[in-house]
Amino acid sequence: MSQSSASKFSIKSLASAGIFYYATLWLIVLVVIGTIAQKYSGLQFCLDKYFSSWWIQPLDMPFVVVPGGRLTMAIIMVNLTAKLIFSTKWKWKMIGINITHIGVMILMIGGVVTAYTTIEGNVALKEGEQANQFSAFHELEIAVIDRSSADEDKVTAFSDGFFRVNEPFSADSLPLKFNILEYYPNCEPTARKESEVNDKLINRAAQNFKLKALTHDAKDQNLAGMMVDISGLKEGQNGTYMLLNSPGLPRISVTAEDGKEYEIILQRRVYKLPFTIKLDTFTRELHAGTSMASAYSSMVEVIEGDTHENVKIYMNHPLRRHGFTFYQASFTQGERNTSILQVVYNDGESLPYYAIITIALGLLLHLVIQLPRLIVAAKQKA
Amino acid sequence: MTPSFPMKYLAILLAALSWLIPASSHAYEKEAGKLASERITADAGELLSPIPVLHGGRIMPLDSFAKVHLLSAYHKSTVKGEDKEKLGYNQWFAQLVLDRDAAYQIKFFRLRNPDLIDHLGLEERLDGLFSLDELREPIDSKSDEIQIIYEKDTDLRTLVEKQLLDLNNVVRTIFAVSRSLTALTPEVMVMDAKLAADMHFPAGKAISYYQLSEAMPKLEPILTGMQGKPSNEHTDYERAAYAVAEQMFRMQQYESSFQSIALIPPAEDPDSNPWLSPWEAIARDDLTETQSSQLAQLSEVILALSFKEDEKAKELIPSYIDSLDITPNIRLEIPETINAWKVPGFLAGIGFTLPFSKNATEMLYNHFDSFEYSLAFYVLGFIFLAISWLQANGKNLRWVSFSWVTLGFLLHTYGLLLRMLIRGRPPVTTIYESIIFVGFTCVLVGLIVEWKRRDGLGLIVAIVPGSILHFVGFKYAIEGDTLKPLVAVLDSNFWLATHVVTITIGYGTSAVAGLIATVYLYVRLFNQKNKALLQSIAKNFVGITLVSLLFAIVGTILGGIWGDQSWGRFWGWDPKENGALLICLWLLLIVHGKWGKQLDELGYATMLSLTSITVLVAWFGVNLLSVGLHSYGFTDGALFWLTLSCGAIAVITFVPAILIYLRDRANSTPPQN
């Protein structure tokens, strides 16, 4: 390597092919490790640890960090941007290569937009039921529900950004104060010993059980739980409560100092939809004479103000409306069938479509230009 | 057509009579003293084979039904009978259903693991072959153990336990198949000649359950008449009638649960409604007139074959198949997705029916194993290529080799096309088909390279993966029906034709690129003086790498788009997605390493030669993790073969690469500095 380029940093050196080479090599390592680890820790955990992370602590060693998937891809993206700006030769011979790189840029921008705007969740509807909201898969919230109004429940929700131990939080509209003592993304309630019971533990779950932290479940079947101090309640109710993200458990009902009643639950974060969706029927067809499904479909009604529209959602044919996409994901059959629709919101959804057209076009052009030169016979020896 | 007699009523009637007649005669006895093979003719199997049956969710000819079942037990499609003669799968099937007791003595269960044979308390045999009669008792004696294994977690089962479970399934399945036509085969002798005549039964012949049930209205008054009388007043005529009824009842009790061959189509929509087995059809009281007549015709067919009346069967079978009225011919249609794109209206809904029947095409596919012949020609091509290397000028022999490989390739293509026609699907829908198709891609690319170069390089890269993949394909094919219907999420010809085909071509071209790089390494090791040859090979692998990159990247992104269309996220770092990404990243790394000069030609060739490892890992490896949306097609022992193959590729690559590196270093003068 020559002396001049090593000693002097210029912004153009961000375009160096070497950066891409070593970043890609590192990404390959991450992909391999992050894939194998899925067998043991579950997909979501590995996604967070290896691919969506800026830094990784290998084997949880203290003070040791290596670049995570997000940082590595950010480096590649900076490298690609610099390459496009500084070192691209805009020549005919290079047109295919250049178009391809622009396509990859579009793809990566799509990745960034997706990473920061996606909401993934689902909504389960029995036949005849309707909904104007859905629950996110990977986000939680503490919902405080005021059922005193006859027409509508008033819900105040604290998303998982608040879930920090010993950092009390509240909301202006609520007389209650929360202070989380323990929080586990995955845990298991274990019986409390007699000696561990005290007056501060208020709800029955907290009195009988304590939480034992678990590692991430390999099949992503996690039970999130917390011990939380709630204050601002009437005499005798202030103290520690146990909240678990499990729909089957009894809800916690409390009365505030001012006499207002609230229900408190730990649940998957709820997002509102700008329209209502109603399930008319769910159908499951089988391959003749087997119990193997050949098709699933939901007939739904999309209700927006006065307009009703009938839409069939089935495999590979989702419903798209106002940036939300509904997919046929699962079902339970019974007296009334329940259809489970996956809901995704993603601002970057269209970019891969443009990217693939650009990349395919670029590579094809390059091949047309290059291939005749590359697939040739050996020159005869003289 | 008389409605079938309600069996419940018969049961009550017999229960009422049974105490009157303590001992009954033994009419249900197989024709004694006759040799097994004498009961049906040698053509019975072929005659039965075109009859349609619903199995595993699709309509297939009995030809396929027979083949799938024999493969499941024997892992080959031709058995050696007791007399060491060959028994094709159709004739095996005919014996199994029409001459059961003989078939139960044929050794067609192949037990590969001596530990399993030992575990069953059987005597070890060189060929590991056992008959159903030999296995029935040992397996029955293990029923408690089998129940425990069933309840065990799949990962915790030992090899012997897994194999015992599989064997249990296969033995029970085939036993059930063998008894599924017992309603139609002649089983009961009516001893009293007058009774037989009154019932219009053919004299001196055994009668089937179906025939008896049709004659029930005539038998019933006789039985009712016996009820009021003490047993010593029963006439011989009445006793015979009673005996017949009792045999019927017993058969109904013991045999009617065997319903493994669904032969009678439903009243409507035979493609998506369940079909009826003979026992089921007889028990139903809501058969349509068409169904009743189909059942009657089927009964005639089975009786004709059971009595060796082949000429009669030859006439009956075509009209029986006609009466089923299932859409027999192959129809090609423009996929719905293309219609949805509002491509010019005249294209929408275009479809036409080909002049050959689907089932006949499937039988053609079953009987002419084009992939086996294709493999034979590839091997032949290899032999000629190898001889050509021994000669100073092997040009003519290379042409011969080229011709053999081309012929093999045509057969390969023919087999693929037949499969596409039968299924009405793009070429790749299962892991088995991906194996066939990757082989196809490799041979195609190899032949193109050979056409350009004419020095044998293209032939090597065609023959090696082409042959190996055929072998791997055979391993998959013996596991049963390779034309099974697809799970719901894959039911999209558009995405199968785009994403799946593209990524599979990517696998193939990547493998070819890797192989050319491997060849380069060996040429450079042994023939480093021939710079022109080395350079031209290097150009080839750069070219093929670009082609692979195109297919791998486009295929991977298309997969993402399918994911977006189908379950709502473009990319989820699912193992299969990561596998495809791995190939893309690896190829990108190599290509950019060359441009950025991180890799010299040796480094490039070495890394490229390792590409096949990433392909194998992406293709098979991720299934071993058995997580994620794509985890299909897992087979036991796959990990061993995968590790072995990857290890072999690494050794084949690194040995010449290191030797070349060491030699170059020794030869080069130290750099001036």
Image: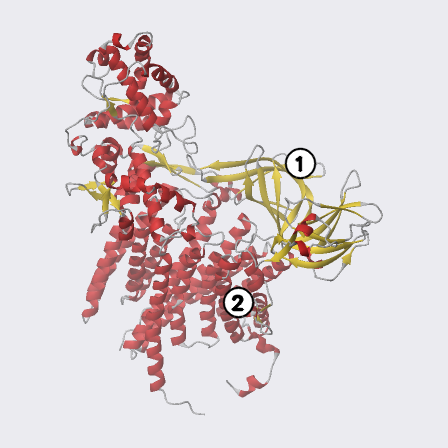
Tell us which disc is closer to us: 1 or 2. 1
Q: Point out residue B299 in the picture as x, y percentages from the top left corner.
A: 28, 24
Q: Residue at x 54, y 68 (%)?
A: A59
- Please state if B416 lies on the left or on the right of A2 as rendered: left
Q: Quadrant of residue B310?
A: top left
Front residue of A53 and A91: A53
Residue occupied by mark 1: A308
Residue occupied by mark 2: A98
Q: Quadrant of residue B398?
A: bottom left
Which amino acid, by three-letter code, is at mark 2? Asn
Q: Point out residue B327 in the picture as x, y percentages from the top left corner.
A: 37, 32
Q: Are marks 1 and 2 in contact (CB under 8 Å)?
A: no
- Please state if B36 lies on the left or on the right of A309 as rendered: left
* Label drawn at residue B235: none
- Please state if B138 lies on the left or on the right of B499 as rendered: left
Which amino acid, by three-letter code, is at mark 1? His
Q: Point out residue A341 in the picture as x, y percentages from the top left corner.
A: 59, 44
In this view, A60 is above or below B528? above
